[in-house]
């Protein structure tokens, strides 16, 4: 029997992968300590931080579930003085501007999060999330990167619809914890070389024959799976077209309020789809 969810599926959750580059003894401890630290990241006039973070075991997976909060340290607000029937100004400390949920799978780094329209965009979320992870524990020299996970079929359908592909730029880094067979050779090579990053660019005035190159298709798939970025330039109907993994991540509608287990359950089917894809 299917259990009814306790909230409205009214917000999109975007799927991405948190990649940690550097040294740490235990990944779970590092993530727990970073997500529960008292560090708040200043960015322009706002500060960003994590609140209400819990470690949850769900479907035999260790998850961290909490909120990324955007707030302002000191702001003047207008209030009504009921006794004198007039308007007064008061200073409010740490006023919350917006908060967004996140669910992070410890083992794979695959995560889902919602945006808050006009206040926390889906790109703004990952930039500030990664910045906090990098700075929360100053004794650990770890670089955090968050890359979108794209729909593989949509990406290649758009790519193959081009009349000509003139340029492909790919930037990759090793996987953690395991490889997918489509890009296993590239990943094992990077692991063996202890390379942190790998970049390559292909250009052709006549048009690149991508469908004939399994290695290139594998590298593109690795970036789609969240281990880097790809940018493609081409021509369709005499118009220059750009395709990028920096746009249009996989998304799934879910609930944003209520019990954390219910929130996880509302988007878990999409997590399972992504997990299965990474294992094939």
Image: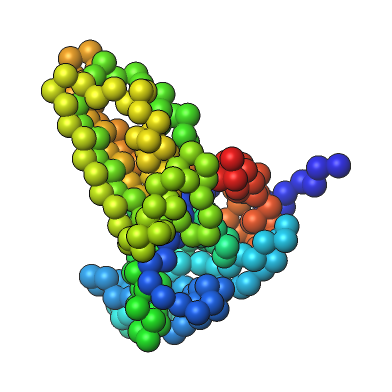
Residue shown at 29% from the left, 49% from the top? 171
Vertical order, 225 against 23 (above or below) = above
Residue shown at 59% from the left, 40% from the top? 280
- Lateral position of residue 32 relative to residue 124, left or right: right
Q: Quadrant of residue 196?
A: bottom left
Residue shown at 48% from the left, 39% from the top? 182
Vertical order, 226 against 28 (above or below) = above
Q: Residue 198, percent across and down?
A: 29, 52
Q: Can you see residue 65?
A: no
Count of residue discs: 0
Q: Nearer the viewer, residue 145 or 23?
A: 23
Vertical order, 159 against 275 (above or below) = above
Q: Residue 233, percent across and down?
A: 22, 30
Q: Residue 168, percent across and down?
A: 24, 35
Q: In which quarter of the image is residue 245?
A: top left
- Lateral position of residue 96 relative to residue 234, left or right: right
Q: Can you see residue 160?
A: yes
Q: Residue 225, percent across and down?
A: 46, 45
Residue shown at 16% from the left, 19% from the top? 206
């Amino acid at each position: 029997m299917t259990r009814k969810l306790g909230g409205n599926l009214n917000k999109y959750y975007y799927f991405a992968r948190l990649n940690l580059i550097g040294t740490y003894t235990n990944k779970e401890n590092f993530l727990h300590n970073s997500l529960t630290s008292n560090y708040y990241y200043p960015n322009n006039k706002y500060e960003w931080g994590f609140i209400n973070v819990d470690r949850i075991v769900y479907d035999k997976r260790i998850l961290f579930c909490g909120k990324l909060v955007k707030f302002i340290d000191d702001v003047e607000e207008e209030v009504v003085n009921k006794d004198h029937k007039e308007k007064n100004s008061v200073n409010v400390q740490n006023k919350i501007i917006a908060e967004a949920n996140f669910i992070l799978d410890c083992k794979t780094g695959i995560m889902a999060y919602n945006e808050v329209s006009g206040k926390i965009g889906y790109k703004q979320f990952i930039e500030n999330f990664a910045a906090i992870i990098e700075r929360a524990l100053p004794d650990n020299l770890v670089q955090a990167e968050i890359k979108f996970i794209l729909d593989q079929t949509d990406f290649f359908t758009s790519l193959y619809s081009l009349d000509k592909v003139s340029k492909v730029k790919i930037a990759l880094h090793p996987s953690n914890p395991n490889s997918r067979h489509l890009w296993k050779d590239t990943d094992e090579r990077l692991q063996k070389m202890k390379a942190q990053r790998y970049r390559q660019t292909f250009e052709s005035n006549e048009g690149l024959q991508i469908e004939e190159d399994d290695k290139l298709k594998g590298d593109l798939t690795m970036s789609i799976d969240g281990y880097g970025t790809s940018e493609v330039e081409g021509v369709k109907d005499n118009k220059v077209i750009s395709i990028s993994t920096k746009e249009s991540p996989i998304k799934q509608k879910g609930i944003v309020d209520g019990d954390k287990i219910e929130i996880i359950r509302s988007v878990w089917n999409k997590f399972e789809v992504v997990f299965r894809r990474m294992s094939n």
